Image (cartoon, rainbow, N blue to C red):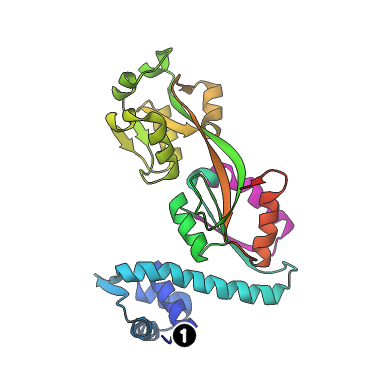
Amino acid sequence: MSFSLQQIRSFVAVAESEHISKAAASLFLTQGAVTQQIRHFERAVGLPLLERDGRGVRLTDAGRALAIACRAALRAVQVLEETAESMKTLRAGSLHLGASPTCAAYYLPSRLAEFAQQHTGIKLHVAVESSADLNRQVLAGALDCALIEGEPNPDLLTVVLAHDELILVAHRDHPLAALDRIALADLIQYRYLGRDPTSAAEQSAREMLGDAYGGSDALNLGHPEYVRAAAIAGLGYAALPRLAVEADLESGSLKQLPGPSTRRAIRGIRRRGPGGPALEQFWLVLTGERSSPT
């Protein structure tokens, strides 16, 4: 196969915007030039990557699979350029990070702030995705590293940064909050407030609650902050990280239920082998004295 870096850039721009004209504007090219680049790229790989969708376009299954690999290829070129330019002075460059929602809210900010204060010339990019998606993107090279709450891909380098406790909570006036002991039959009677069913936190909640997880009426709200807000409003009970509800427990807005809890590791993940200067410096911030390798 023979294709150019410009064809890859054009395809990634279209994949991210799902619109030829928007991609062309971001690349400072004409729509015709971008369309031609995409056609040449599709011929080179021998696969249809885009299909028309109204006034825009959408990725085919092959296009979605190749988009991650293409982002990784562009990131590799960017790291090469930055390494040559900065020569480890870190006066320029970028860092592409990922974090699961819990990690993005409670574990990444302080570490990222410490790094940003030391290296003001580095441009920061953070993608908030599920732990499973972050494993795939880090392994492919689309992200430099990530903080996850789920299981790491065994092919990645991993460090444990902290341990997170998942607890059951409900509004102080919720019927479950009045119980001294909670049985499976008690939980099944009330609405469970959940996140994305595919998230690592939700998988931990499923294991923690056992048969009660599927037996309760469920309201899936996506982000853990939406779940917290719904629990405070009295819509049901939830399994949330203790860090996320500490202030609410202290104020009395929420009450920890006398049910099961579970601890899980918060991990940093990256590919094995040397990375760019920005990654290596950020990894030092992560691994310091606050984490232990696995």
Mark 1 element type: loop
x and y percentages locating residue 51 in the rendered image: 27, 73
Q: Which residues are magenta?
A: 104-127
What amino acid type is highlighted by mark number 1? Ser
Q: Image point 37% across, 44% down: which residue?
A: 196
Based on the picture, tell me whether residue 20 belongs to the magenta stretch.
Answer: no
Q: Quadrant of the N terminus?
A: bottom left
Based on the picture, tell me whether residue 113 belongs to the magenta stretch.
Answer: yes
Q: Image point 40% across, 76% down: which residue?
A: 11
Up/down of 198 relative to 12, above or below: above
Q: Which residue is mark 1?
A: 4
Q: In the displayed orientation, state which residue is furthest to the left.
A: 54
x and y percentages locating residue 160 in the rendered image: 61, 45
x and y percentages locating residue 165 in the rendered image: 53, 32
Q: Image point 40% across, 40% down: which residue?
A: 203
Q: Residues within 10 Å of mark 1 (few under 14, many from 20)?
A: few
Up/down of 259 relative to 140, above or below: above
Q: Quadrant of residue 210?
A: top left
